[in-house]
Image: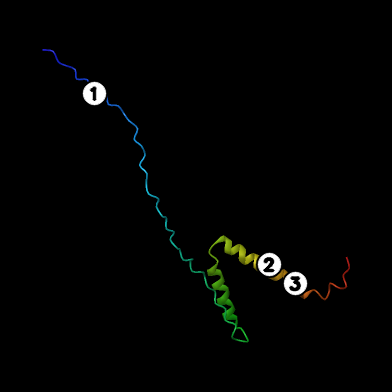
Amino acid sequence: MATKKVIPKQTTITKKTPVKKAPVKRTVKKVSPAPASVISVDVSGATKSASSMVDKAIDLIKWVDTPFKLFEVILLASIFFFGYFAWDSRKFSRWIKF
């Protein structure tokens, strides 16, 4: 008995034209800004006790949680210190001549 070989039919592949899709409006979700860290400063009292200053220092340390905030605190403290030093020594600068 002889067996017949079945040859599959060759199918021609035709390129399909791309289907045009309707333009889609993209909506942008409005993201509310993250709540900012709040440092409360109470200046109501004329005299400040040592414990309130310590509490404020601890609150500042808690607020510094990223390297950027640490850099910001150091930079502002340095500017404040040098500004105060320049302001305080301004009376001596008129006698110094360069």
Q: Secondary structure at mark 3?
A: helix
Q: CA distance from mark 3 to mark 1?
A: 94 Å
Q: Tell me what residue is drawn at x 30 percent, y 27 percent.
A: 12
Residue in the image at 65% along x and 68% along y: 76
The percent position of residue 77, horizontal first and vertical second, equals: 66, 69
For label 1, the residue is 9
The residue pinned by badge 2 equals: 78
Q: Secondary structure at mark 2?
A: helix
- Residue 91, image x, y percentages: 82, 76
- Asked which secondary structure carries label 1, the reply is loop
Outermost residue on the bottom side: it is 46
- Characterize the local packing of mark 2: few (<14), some (14-19) or many (20 or more) Cα atoms within 10 angstroms: few
Q: Amino acid at mark 1?
A: Lys
Q: Are marks 1 and 2 in contact (CB under 8 Å)?
A: no
Residues tagged 2 and 3 counted as in contact (Cβ below 8 A): no
Could you tell me which residue is drawn at 16 percent across and 16 percent down?
A: 4
Q: Which mark is residue 85?
A: 3
Quarter holding the N terminus is top left
The three-letter amino acid code for the residue at tag 2 is Ser
Question: Which quadrant of the view contains residue 2?
Answer: top left
Q: Is residue 12 left or right of residue 64?
A: left
